[in-house]
Image: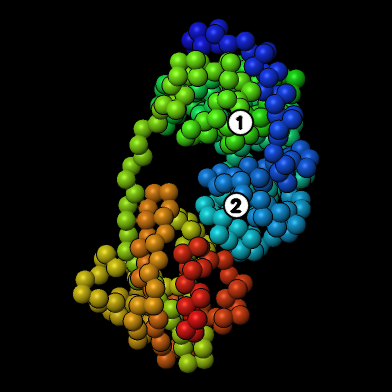
């Protein structure tokens, strides 16, 4: 490993400046009330791909509902998904519950402080493992995500593409070399805060940075050009027709999505893949795929929803049916009141106000 980058930095002075700044400026976040491993774990899973301000109310509600691993392990998955509703990336919730159940069954409810045991749990990748081990158990283990790579790409002037797994390994090596052995918990959290508040993706506030004098990119005047990241693949676009199907009893048809894949296990209003059906031959498709006979009305709204890799354009139509029961196991008739009990993804939550002409 090339250590020339490390030779240009006074690691102990870097640690001292960073930790002093963190002690004086650390963010007041609910999961920092203590270093309980379960709270750290839940927060880190929620914070993946999600902003802090969005996570805070979800975290507080989740911890009130499931204050320890035991309550989460015993909960119904549909209830957990309902608590997660609107937070997105629902596989995080399913994996978290699966892993927590293993903690209860295998480790008597104690989250492992052994790197291998912890890393073998469902959904616990290198970053989450490092965060738990360092923050909760004060082990000097790096927790490297995009935020951390941005900070260190500037501090150490690293121009390798951060989208590559080999580059992430490089950062894990450097953070492991630079992490405070005395207070790794504060060190990793300080880097997280630094990246979130000062060493931001655009227009970093270098004048307020506690480690500015250690930063090689600042010295070279290229801090805004780092990190280097290749462009992601273009998002795929898909068109759907969503149906708000009401019967004569005033109940609506909802559908449970498959147990794997995008939005697994959540509920939605039935959707027709519009790209695959020509000339609006929707009724034959509904009969063949759902066993439904419906009268489709005019469009009441259109919804665009952007996922990380796909964009949904959904045209929402009201529809009526004379059916009182459904044969397809995926489908269910529910009242408006019962609807509140089921976890829906965000685009379908936006359709609910249009029921009964609202």
- The mark tally for this picture is 2
Examine the rendered structure and indicate whether residue 132 appears above or below residue 250: above
Q: Nearer the viewer, residue 314 or 256?
A: 314
Q: Nearer the viewer, residue 323 or 344?
A: 344
Residue for point 45% across, 19% down: 221
Q: Give the percent coordinates (x, y) of residue 229.
A: 40, 31
- Residue at which label 1 appears: 194
Rounded to the nearest whole Å, what is the CA distance between mark 1 and mark 2? 19 Å
Is residue 176 visible to us here? no
Is residue 357 visible to us here? yes
Residue for point 56% across, 44% down: 48
User: Callout 2: 10 Å neighbours few (<14), some, many (20+)?
Assistant: few
Examine the rendered structure and indicate whether residue 117 appears above or below residue 297: above
Quarter of the image for residue 224 reads top left
Q: Give the percent coordinates (x, y) of residue 191.
A: 62, 29
Quarter of the image for residue 317 reads bottom left
SS label for mark 1? helix
Q: Nearer the viewer, residue 296 or 53?
A: 53
Of the image marks 1 and 2, the number of the one nearer the N terminus:
2
């Amino acid at each position: 490993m090339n250590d020339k980058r490390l030779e240009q930095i006074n690691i102990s002075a870097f640690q001292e400046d960073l930790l002093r700044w963190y002690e004086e400026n650390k963010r007041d976040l609910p999961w920092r009330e203590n270093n309980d491993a379960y709270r750290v774990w839940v927060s880190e899973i929620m914070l993946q791909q999600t902003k802090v301000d969005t996570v805070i109310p979800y975290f507080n509600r989740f911890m009130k509902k499931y204050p320890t691993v035991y309550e989460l392990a015993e909960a119904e998955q549909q209830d957990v998904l309902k608590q997660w509703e609107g937070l997105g990336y629902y596989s995080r919730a399913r994996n978290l519950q699966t892993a927590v159940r293993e903690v209860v069954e295998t480790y008597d409810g104690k989250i492992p402080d052994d790197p291998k045991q912890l890393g073998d749990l469902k959904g616990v990748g290198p970053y989450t493992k490092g965060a738990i081990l360092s923050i909760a158990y004060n082990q000097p283990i790096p927790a490297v995500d995009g935020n951390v790579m941005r900070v260190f790409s500037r501090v150490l002037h690293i121009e390798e593409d951060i989208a590559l797994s080999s580059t992430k390994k490089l950062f894990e090596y450097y953070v492991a070399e630079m992490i405070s052995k005395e207070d790794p918990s504060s060190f990793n959290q300080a880097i997280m805060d630094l990246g979130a508040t000062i060493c931001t993706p655009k227009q970093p506030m270098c004048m307020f940075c506690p480690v500015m004098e250690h930063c090689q990119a600042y010295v070279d005047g290229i801090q805004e050009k780092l990190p280097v990241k290749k462009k992601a693949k273009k998002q795929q676009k898909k068109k759907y027709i969503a149906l708000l199907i009401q019967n004569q009893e005033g109940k609506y048809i909802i559908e449970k999505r498959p147990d794997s894949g995008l939005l697994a296990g959540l509920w939605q209003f039935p959707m027709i893949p519009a790209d695959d059906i020509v000339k609006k031959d929707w009724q034959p498709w509904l009969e063949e795929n759902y066993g439904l006979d419906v009268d489709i009305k005019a469009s009441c709204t259109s919804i665009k929803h952007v996922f990380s890799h796909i964009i949904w354009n959904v045209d929402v139509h009201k529809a009526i049916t004379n059916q009182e029961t459904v044969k397809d196991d995926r489908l269910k008739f529910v009242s408006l009141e019962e609807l509140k009990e089921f976890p829906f993804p965000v685009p379908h939550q936006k359709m609910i106000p249009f029921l009964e002409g609202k």
